[in-house]
Amino acid sequence: MIRTFAVAVRDGTTLAHDPATGLTHRAPLALPPGRAELDGAEVSKWPVVHPAACGGTVPVSVCWSPIVRCNLQCPHCLDDKSVTELGAADQRRIARLIAGTDVLGVDISGGEPLLLPDLAHLADELTAGGCAVSVTTNGWHLQRRAARLAGHVDAVKVSLDGPSSLVHDAWRGPESFSRAIDGVKEAVAAGLCVQLQSVLMASSRAFAQDLVRLAHRLGAAGVTFLQMLPIGEAARLPPAEMLSDNEAQALIERLDVPPELTVRLRTRRGAGGFTVIRADGRVWRNDRPAEHISALRPLRSPADLTLTGPDGSA
């Protein structure tokens, strides 16, 4: 499948950032910088470069959560509900600011980003600067918004906690599974690249294979399993829900994955140092390992995104 990636040369290495998986790959050939149409299956074979090894003065990718509001109340949500949202003008300012840096990938998250009426315009500000843009959503409003997002965002990541309403709705509430599935179908029909995302916990590990099968049936590009992080609402979950990175890796390696599907595990260690721009316009970074979030500074200029540590940490 031909998809949009963001390409840059950092420290003499050509990098291609995949907005669907959030991974950055080392290209084996020279590519012109900027947004590029590449074969997703081919890029997935290229070596993955850890964000801390990508070089440059700013993160290779960021998560931007311009909204705190959400129509669901998930007990494993990472968001800090006490954060105050900036207004529309400041959101556009931040989009233009990110677009003016060397950041390759931006995942617009929340809260629930599909509640933003001008989401497509914010994405346009980012893509105009050469970024590859994804949106992470609970899928509730995706069916009605998918067609309008096509051509504005490069990938949609839909959160699922299980392969059925019985499992998923126990976490997110009635109808949330059916709404998410209808949204995925509409997004695929609209030509959007869809990646399913699932928080990996002790109570959900048994459903991993069924989620892979579901992704394949729906025509999604892949599944990303996210190690549970004890951050935000998720800090209230029992510690026993946390799998070790080794346990999670062993689980993923046992999965039967169709060749046309990409399955990725984001470990707790791998999430360390990741940059988050919160709804109040402050730049945060995950600690190492990613079990806390540290507030750094208000985002007023590109310099506020600068990486200062030798490993890319703040």
Image: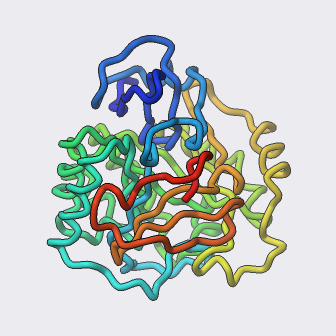
Q: Decide: is 129 above or below 3.
A: below
Viewport quadrant of the C terminus = bottom right
Of 268 and 194, the residue lying toward us: 268
Q: Residue at x 23, y 61 (%)?
A: 119
Of residues 201 and 309, the one drawn nearer to the viewer in this rendering: 309
Q: Position of residue 103 (x, y in %)?
A: 37, 45
Kindly identify the residue that appears in the image at 62 percent across and 46 percent down: 311
Q: Residue at x 66, y 49 (%)?
A: 270
Front in this rendered view, residue 92 or 148: 92
Residue 303: image location, x then y, percent: 34, 57
Splitting the image into 4 quarters, where does residue 91 fall?
Answer: bottom left
Along the horizontal axis of the image, is 63 left or right of 172? left
Residue at the outermost bottom position = 82
- Looking at the picture, how far across and down is residue 287, in whole percent? 64, 64
**Residue 104: x %, y % from top left:** 37, 41
Looking at the image, residue 213 lies above or below residue 98: above
42 or 273: which is nearer to us? 273
The residue furthest top is 29
| Coloring scheme used | rainbow
In the rendered image, which quarter contains the N terminus? top left
State whether residue 83 is above or below residue 212: below
Residue 8 falls in image quadrant: top left
294 up-or-down from 55: above or below? below
Residue at image coords 52%, 49% = 196
Count numbered badges in the picture. 0
